[in-house]
Amino acid sequence: MERASCLLLLLPLVHVSATTPGPCELDDKDFRCVCNFSEPHPDWSEAFQCVSAVEVEIRVGGLSLEPFLKSVDPDADPRQYADTVKALRVRRLTLGAAQVPAQLLVGALRVLAYSRLQELTLEDLEITGTMPPLPLEATGLALSSLRLRNVSWATGRSWLAELQQWLKPGLKVLSIAQAHSPAFSCEQVRAFPALTSLDLSDNPGLGERGLIAALCPHKFPALQNLALRNTGMETPTGVCAALAAAGVQPHSLDLSHNSLRATADPSAPRCMWSSALNSLNLSFAGLGQVPKGLPAKLRVLDLSCNRLNRRPRPDELPQVDNLTLDGNPFLVPGTALPQEGSMNSGVVPACARSTLSVGVSGTLVLLQGARGFA
């Protein structure tokens, strides 16, 4: 029980006992193991079979893990379990659907620091309480990828800075979806020197002003790929201004699944795109014409599944090597022309089935089943 207490959220991976058929399922190749502890009083030892898995997913049906605090020794040295944790095969871990005291989360991160874990996903979690500071002797978690979806933090805007202190600086991929507070306390956040991919998709309340607050200036010096699907963006020009204000120069920018306007505010100053940008995704954006103010030159421009009723003229487009126009009405005979007041007129049926419908307000209410941007 002492070991289980110290391993905290990793309890299902190391608590050894007899295995009986239950909420966990391990595939035939001992590669992926999924546990869904939905009973009011689950037997955590059911997950012992996940010890051999490379990919582990554990969900606890919204239960609170606070009872584990009674058996936790906050002064315990996790190094005594280093060999046990290092022996685990797990490389990708998903924890979801739980109420987690911050002290338990910190304990799990401390133990995971001795593992070979590469990718961590937290979904549908409520983190309660404040995260304690990193002890001087603690080793940060060496993740390459961190994905968060619908995770709430009691600490408000400072949550990213508090979580960051428990990570080594080599993180390459960060995804934050359905965030309760997508704006960060930038003065507390340290730079992410190795981060190349940032995905802020599925935060429809973000908007262009919120984007400036989320892209803490000069904190993402190595950023190459930025995904902003379904984030309330309005015009490419507005996004350009936000990127310039934050000092972010991505190579690839995904603005798909936003209800974009083709023309910017006439009073807004002209924005010069960074020459580093070579790929722009404007698919599923409800565009009836090519937006104004695009970069002068691109390697890839995706305008698929919009509402273009004719092929764009060369003078309407940037200099582009790879242009995608699939799924627009002018390419599909018989597609109705867009009519004012109609939500779906002018949308190619294949695109409508595979993605979304755009409401009158421009809010995207049905998202494409794409996962994180990597």
Image (tube, rainbow, N blue to C red):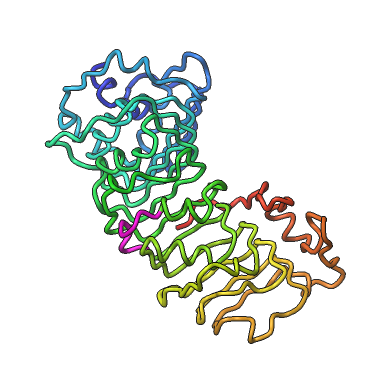
Q: Is 289 or 131 nearer to us in this picture?
A: 289
Q: Residue furthest left?
A: 137
Identify the image quadrant of the N terminus.
top left
Q: Tell me the quarter of the picture where residue 345 sits.
A: bottom right
Q: Is 39 or 105 nearer to us in this picture?
A: 105
Q: Tell me the quarter of the picture where residue 88 sits.
A: top left
Q: Main secondary structure of the magenta part?
A: loop
Q: Residue furthest bottom?
A: 314
Magenta part of the protein: which range? 215-223
Residue beneath the point at 22% across and 42% down: 140
**How far across and how far down the image is residue 241, in percent?**
47, 65
Image position of 109 (left or right of 235): left
Relative vertical location of residue 277 with respect to residue 351 in this rendering, above or below: below
Q: Is 255 or 340 nearer to us in this picture?
A: 340
**How far across and how far down the image is residue 288, in percent?**
72, 69
Identify the image quadrant of the C terminus.
bottom left
Q: Is 43 or 102 nearer to us in this picture?
A: 102
Residue beneath the point at 78% across and 60% down: 349
**Residue 347 included in the magenta stretch of the image:** no
**How far across and how far down the image is residue 342, in percent?**
82, 56
State the count of labels.
0
Residue beneath the point at 29% across and 30% down: 131
Residue beneath the point at 49% across and 34% down: 124
Relative vertical location of residue 201 with respect to residue 114 in this rendering, above or below: below
Image position of 200 (left or right of 128): right
Q: Tell me the quarter of the picture where residue 224 sits.
A: bottom left
Image position of 36 (left or right of 92): right
**How far across and how far down the image is residue 193, in percent?**
27, 58
Relative vertical location of residue 315 with respect to residue 255 in this rendering, above or below: below
